[in-house]
Image (tube, rainbow, N blue to C red):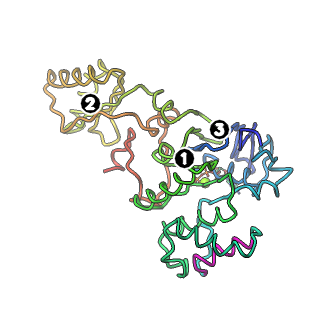
Amino acid sequence: MSDAAIQVQDLGKRFGDIVAVDGVNLEVPAGTVLGLLGPNGAGKTTIVRILTTILRSDSGTATVGGHDVARNPDAVRTIIGLAGQYAAVDGNLTGRENLRMVGRLTHQRKAVIGPRADELLDRFGLADAADRPVRTYSGGMRRRLDLAAALVHKPPILFLDEPTTGLDPRGRNDLWTVIGELVADGMTLLLTTQYLEEAERLANRVMVIDGGKVIAEGTPEELKHRLGSTIIEVRLADAAAAERARGRLESVGTAEVLDDGRTVALTVGDAGRAVLEVVRTLDAAGLTPEWLTVREPTLDDVFLQLTGHKAEDAPAADEGAEPARAGRGRKRGAA
Ligand SMILES: Nc1ncnc2c1ncn2[C@@H]1O[C@H](COP(=O)(O)OP(=O)(O)OP(=O)(O)O)[C@@H](O)[C@H]1O
Ligand SMILES: [Mg+2]
């Protein structure tokens, strides 16, 4: 196996008129985590389905563990695990039965299936629920079982398609912890997500995709640095005050009013000096802010800057279960 556990060149896939994947190149070194970050319809699942041999690409090549996914799909399947966007476990079986079934389907030796299932149930905090039908599990428990099912045959390369979408903050955190442990054990992971916080937390490198194309890549840190180093946000009493403040603060940095109509966000280079200038400028204009915050840019900010639209102009299914998003223009949703 070369150092790259996953290698993709010029990958393309259309569905009729829709170009789902448009010339994607990527490489995941063994033992590292790549985060594919993009909004609904970006092409994330299509890429995962091609790499996990479920779907054929129209153009380009992809190898996983050194095996070409189109020419040698069986070899690829033996070395990968996949937990899809929707948990694929059987609700009528118990957790233990699900894992044993996967053990049989992946041709594990009979003697190892039982102990392996027990070990995974234990590891993922499901031992107490092991003999209950999965339909009685919470969303977070299902996701953990689905992840366990992907690991029964001990694959060195794992694909997780939006592993925490739909979970509450606690469920998301639990899953991040177990995924982090897998990564610490040396797993190669390709993860898709719409949560910038998730990519920051788990990925060594991030590729931002939109409309089937890679629009940016780097470490989470690098992506954040593209934006300028610091964001200062100032909440004013009303829209008129915010507009007046924005006009004055243009002299300090790039200023814009957020969706709530009352918060001015400033992107600045030198945070310390800028904070002083913001305070002086507002004071001179007779404007008193309700609050003022200074923060590092998030990947949300990067996404908005790169694409001109928000990363999550979409899923309503998990509203109320979103992680904290500090991105520009998000204040209304985060309230
Ligand atoms: N089987 C299909 N038939 C037709 N169009 C498809 C099919 N699968 C995906 N598409 C389209 O391809 C594009 C990319 O879809 P894909 O599911 O890969 O996006 P995604 O990034 O996974 O989005 P989400 O975050 O909503 O899961 C979308 O426009 C989608 O409608
Ligand atoms: Mg998807």
Image coordinates for residue 324, horizontal then vertical, percent: 37, 49
Give amino acid for label 3: Lys
Quarter of the image where the N terminus is located: top right
Q: State which quadrant residue 107 falls in.
A: bottom right
Q: Nearer the viewer's eye, disc 1 or disc 2? A: 1
> Residue at label 2?
243
Q: Secondary structure at mark 3?
A: strand
The quarter of the image that holds ligand 2 is: bottom right
Residue 39: image tag: 1
Question: At x 36% / y 28%, what residue is drawn?
Answer: 230
Give amino acid for label 1: Pro
Q: Is residue 255 left or right of residue 313?
A: left
Q: Which one is earlier in the sequence, the residue at label 2 or at label 3?
A: 3
- In this view, the residue in front, 246 or 141, is 141
Give amino acid for label 2: Glu
Q: Nearer the viewer's eye, disc 2 or disc 3? A: 3
- In this view, the residue in front, 231 or 245, is 231
Mark 1 within 8 Å of ligand 1, using the beta carbon: yes
Question: At x 45% / y 59%, what residue is drawn?
Answer: 174
Residue 158: image tag: none
> Residue at label 3?
213
**Which stretch appears magenta?**
93-105
Residue 149 sits above or below residue 249 on the image: below
Image coordinates for residue 209, horizontal then vertical, percent: 60, 40
